[in-house]
Image: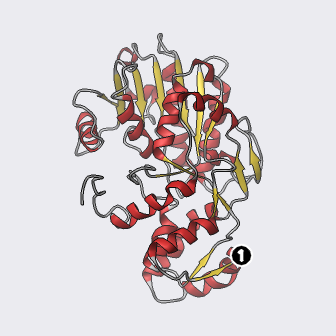
Amino acid sequence: MLLLTGATGMVGREILARAAIDPEVTQLLCLIRPTGQESAQERLAALCQTMAVPVGAARAVAGDVTEPGLGVPVEDLADVTHVIHCAASVSFDLPLAEARGVNVTGTQHVLDACRTMPLLKRLDAVSTCYVAGRRTGLILESDLEHDSGFHNTYEQTKYESEILLRGAMSELPIAVHRPSIVVGDSRTGRTGAWKVLYWPLKVIARGWLPVIPYDPGSRLDIVPVDFVADGVLTLASDPTTVGGTFHLAAGPGRDTTTGELFSRVFRKLDRRPPLRVPPAVFRRGIRPLLLVVPSQRLKRTLTAGLVYRPYLELGLRFDTTQADDHLAPAGVTCPAVTDYIDTIVQTALDTDFGRRPTPSPDSE
């Protein structure tokens, strides 16, 4: 029996769709938090309909990673053999205590629950490459502890969560998977979240800023969600990956630059790019001037940009040697960003960044 947390999230829902039709997964149990309007099973049923998951292929258990024991009776988890932990708060601007409540305490509760599962074979935890925080240079998959600081509470609490996971590897069969910046499906552009990279794309598409602050040489490591989901499930089925940490990232040779990405976006929009300014000049001189302009939309744009802008200015890349070595024999490879970014941009434009349904591949 596979227990999946975070099934309603961007990566979790793609793992759900694949695990539900995997003949190796005999039973699929999804930990889902009920809301005031919907039960756990009702939320799962709606999600399964969205993701075209066969009826009855997954079962919901009401619970929450923020609760001790996941809020589930111990006997309900007695048959679990595998756990994939995707549940997390991915908001960049949460207060630290609130982010820790989900990402750190939630992971601790998952570890505690795993210790009560007599049949457990492994726990696969989804983290992020950006536990590297403000580090620069090439980040190895084995790297973790550092004192370089973080850009936001998401990075910090995922780092703290990994510290817990590393500490428990001596007693539990754990593997950690670190995606980089996740975007939609490489083939269809479909996505369950319109954050991070989609924010600057939206700003550009709608012309919300008179100038664009970025360094065209900054590296962007972007991965499609289909690769991440396939990667997690493939690594989770490989007994030799226990105890490892894997970068589900584009990596050197498949990542891109901010300049190349934005050039493609403007070609797709058939629009002349606005003036580019160095990020430091924008922060120190232009942004303060724009903040006094009497436009609420401009103020909202400038405020939102504070949490996303660092990812357009990073000086780090992610080594993917271990992940590639394990995934390649199974035919799972990460495409180069430039191979599919046009699809991501086109779907964002076609759906008005999620305000309209994603067109069917068979539609005219």
The residue identified by callout 1 is 280
The total number of labels drawn is 1
Q: Is residue 188 left or right of residue 265?
A: left
- Please state the horizontal and vertical placement of residue 348, each as a whole percent of the image: 40, 63
Q: Is residue 257 above or below residue 2?
A: below
Q: Is residue 107 visible?
A: no
Q: Is residue 149 above or below residue 262?
A: above
Please, which colouring scheme is shown?
secondary structure
- Please state the horizontal and vertical placement of residue 196, each as a whole percent of the image: 52, 59
244 or 185, nearer to the observer:
185
Query: Which residue is most to the top?
Result: 118
Please state, as top left, top right, bottom left or bottom right, where the C terminus lies in the image: bottom left
Q: Is residue 347 left or right of residue 265?
A: left
Please state, as top left, top right, bottom left or bottom right, where the N terminus lies in the image: top left
Tag 1: amino acid: Ala
Quick one: label 1, few (<14), some, or many (20+) residues within 10 Å?
Answer: few
Q: Residue at x 50, y 50 (%)?
A: 90
90 or 255, nearer to the observer:
255
Q: Is residue 350 visible?
A: yes
Q: Residue at x 42, y 35 (%)?
A: 15
Q: Residue at x 38, y 29 (%)?
A: 19
- Please state the horizontal and vertical placement of residue 246, each as a whole percent of the image: 63, 35
Q: Is residue 85 above or below residue 297?
A: above
Q: Determine the secondary structure under disc 1.
A: helix
Q: Residue at x 41, y 64 (%)?
A: 346
